[in-house]
Image (cartoon, helix red, strand yellow):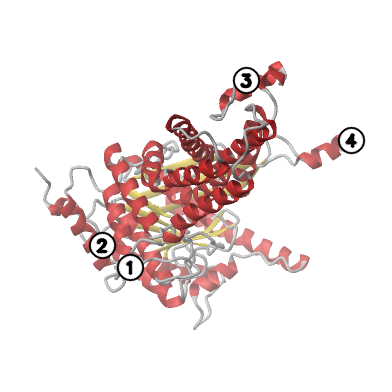
């Protein structure tokens, strides 16, 4: 029996209100020891300025209240701690490198795992081959409860499209940064819509009006934002509507325009990790006027406050002046904060580690991953054609070089070389898979952090979808190369050659997964792949006989699939 659609609501429908209370939140990051400086200190017998216990303060006893139904903006210049505060409240700080202390309470003693929350990252990590509607449909399949029907999920997607103002572009492909078919604002609203499908009571947004535009050369993902002033206003207006419907919306923002400032309910002004003001946006002008920093008329309050909280490093005198001003502002706010909180009982709740939401089951995850990857693969015909064309060309080149080898002693030696270069074909697929994975893994990392996709579903779904590439490539290569070289013409021998080629193909893509798992960086992962592949080929028996290897290296031959006795 399916649930009524009214029980799976998002947007302007009623949500469970959640108050967020932060008290004395501090974040300290452990500094890495500079090996070069440490060695110099040792050799020069200088007193080292580095210690294993040294740390840097990112946030210093920040306290703020964020009531339900409010839109709270965290302001400050670059390096002020905006994103760190947002991540700390959302429990997304890495516990190994950061020491977090203080109290973060949801609804007077609740934990983050007790409320429905969602986090919109700064980058728009979307599949460019999908339309906006398809993107939201797959997100709904992963985020909405397993008991929901397909029709119910469709209804939720359509209501989300209407609420986000994406009706006109719903069937437009998202596109890449080089060939963008959707605007930056439409991509940003799509990213927010993906998170809204989980129906959160608390919504975190990291720089929703700016984002990052790193260079993207991939046809798989796009990270382009490029939000203009008008689109930025529309995005914050949409977030304001979400807050009006009962959600607690918390955003970090650099310098909003004056129209955006008028939409904010509450403001947190940070400077070098310390709070200079935490309260209603409408009360900021009167507060700073009382401490002799009146906002001039016809000046954007947000820009004035960010400039007030910034440090001028252009000269020693200017830096000294701004630092003394910041100390005065911190002291003034701390005294006001103490007076306001003196009558309140402070909540002492330990800092809670990040808890993931419970996604759908493995079967649906695998189904969504497979179908989505198949669709994006078919919509990238150049990628599929490139793999097949590459295997065809390499088979023809190798086959021409080793064409119709004789059966004499020289021919036998040449056959060994021919089989060696045939297995080297898997190296090209290894490099291709590493490149693709370093791009595709960004979306998986985001979905996994949201708790909607697991590792087994991602890997199995990917390989099931890529079977249209994984099998044709070695089959085409074997059919051309085997008979051009003139190897033994019987079904059993060809079957063994084909089986080894397919096994080498899957060994290569599996090794690619391992390399990307060790490092998300393409340069580092390719370095690891080349190192492992070189060791494999040198120890598998093709270059040097396994019996001639040192005893302590012979075990390496068993880690490859192309071992020859």
Mark 4 crowd level (few <14, some 14–19, many ≥20, 10 Å Cα): few
Q: How many angstroms separate mark 4 from mark 3 (CA)?
A: 41 Å
- Closer to the chain start, of discs 2 and 1, is 2
Mark 1 crowd level (few <14, some 14–19, many ≥20, 10 Å Cα): some
Check the picture and name the quadrant holding the C terminus. Answer: top right
Q: Residue at x 49, y 63 (%)?
A: 211
What residue does disc 3 label? 555
- Closer to the chain start, of discs 2 and 4, is 4
What residue does disc 4 label? 43
Q: How many angstroms separate mark 2 from mark 4 (CA)?
A: 64 Å
Which of 207/434 is in front?
Answer: 434
- In the rendered image, residue 267, in percent from the top left (x then y), is placed at 44, 63
Report helix, strand or loop for mark 1: helix
Q: How many angstroms separate mark 2 from mark 1 (CA)?
A: 12 Å
What residue does disc 2 label? 160
Q: How many angstroms separate mark 4 from mark 1 (CA)?
A: 60 Å
Residue 97 seen in render: no
- Closer to the chain start, of discs 4 and 1, is 4
Residue 458 seen in render: yes
Which of 374/88 is in front?
Answer: 374
Q: Residue furthest left?
A: 1
What residue does disc 1 label? 238
- In the rendered image, residue 331, in percent from the top left (x then y), is placed at 58, 56
């Amino acid at each position: 029996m399916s649930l009524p659609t009214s029980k799976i609501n998002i947007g302007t429908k009623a949500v469970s209100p959640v108050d967020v209370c932060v008290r004395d939140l501090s974040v300290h990051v452990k500094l890495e020891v500079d090996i070069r400086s440490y060695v110099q200190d040792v050799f020069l017998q200088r007193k080292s300025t580095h210690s294993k216990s040294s740390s840097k303060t990112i946030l210093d006893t920040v306290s703020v209240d964020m009531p339900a139904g409010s839109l709270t903006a965290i302001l400050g210049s670059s390096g002020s701690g905006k994103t760190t505060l947002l991540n700390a409240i959302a429990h997304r700080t890495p516990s190994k490198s950061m020491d977090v202390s203080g109290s973060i309470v949801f609804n007077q003693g609740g934990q983050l795992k007790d409320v429905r929350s969602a986090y919109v990252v700064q980058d728009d990590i979307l599949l460019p081959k999908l339309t906006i509607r398809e993107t939201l449909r797959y997100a709904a399949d992963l985020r909405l409860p397993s008991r929901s029907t397909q029709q119910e999920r469709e209804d939720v997607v359509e209501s989300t499209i209407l609420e986000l103002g994406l009706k006109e572009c719903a069937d437009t492909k998202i596109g890449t940064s080089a060939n963008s078919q959707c605007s930056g604002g439409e991509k940003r609203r799509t990213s927010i819509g993906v998170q809204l499908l989980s129906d959160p009571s608390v919504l975190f947004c990291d720089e929703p009006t700016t984002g990052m535009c790193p260079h993207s050369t991939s046809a798989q993902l796009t990270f382009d934002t490029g939000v203009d002033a008008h689109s930025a206003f529309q995005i914050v207006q949409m977030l304001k509507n979400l807050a009006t419907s009962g959600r607690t919306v918390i955003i970090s923002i650099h310098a909003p325009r004056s129209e955006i400032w008028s939409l904010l309910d509450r403001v947190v002004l940070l400077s070098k990790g310390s709070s200079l003001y935490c309260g209603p946006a409408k009360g900021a002008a009167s507060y700073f006027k009382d401490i002799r920093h009146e906002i001039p008329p016809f000046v954007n309050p947000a820009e004035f406050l960010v400039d007030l909280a910034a440090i001028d490093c252009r000269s020693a005198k200017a830096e000294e002046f701004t630092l003394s001003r910041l100390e005065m502002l911190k002291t003034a706010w701390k005294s006001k904060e103490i007076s306001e909180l003196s009558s309140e009982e402070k909540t002492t709740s330990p800092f809670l580690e990040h808890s993931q939401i419970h996604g759908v089951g493995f079967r649906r995850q695998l189904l969504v991953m497979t179908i989505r990857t198949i669709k994006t693969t078919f919509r990238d015909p150049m990628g599929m054609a490139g793999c097949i064309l590459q295997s065809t060309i390499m088979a023809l080149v190798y086959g021409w070089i080793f064409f119709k080898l004789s059966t004499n002693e020289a021919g036998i030696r040449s056959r060994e070389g021919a089989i060696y270069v045939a297995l080297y074909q898997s190296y090209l697929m290894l490099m291709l898979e590493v490149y693709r994975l370093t791009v595709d893994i960004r979306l998986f990392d985001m979905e996994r952090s949201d708790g909607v996709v697991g590792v087994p579903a991602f890997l199995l779904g990917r390989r099931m979808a890529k079977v249209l590439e994984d099998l044709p490539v070695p089959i085409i290569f074997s059919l051309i190369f085997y008979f051009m070289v003139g190897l033994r013409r019987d079904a059993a021998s060809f079957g063994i050659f084909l089986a080894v080629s397919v096994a080498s193909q899957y060994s290569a893509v599996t090794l690619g997964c391992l390399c990307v798992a060790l490092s998300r960086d393409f340069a580092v992962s390719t370095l690891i792949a080349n190192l492992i592949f070189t060791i494999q080929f040198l120890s598998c028996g093709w270059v040097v006989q396994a019996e001639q290897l040192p005893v302590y290296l012979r075990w390496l031959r068993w880690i490859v699939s192309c071992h020859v006795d």
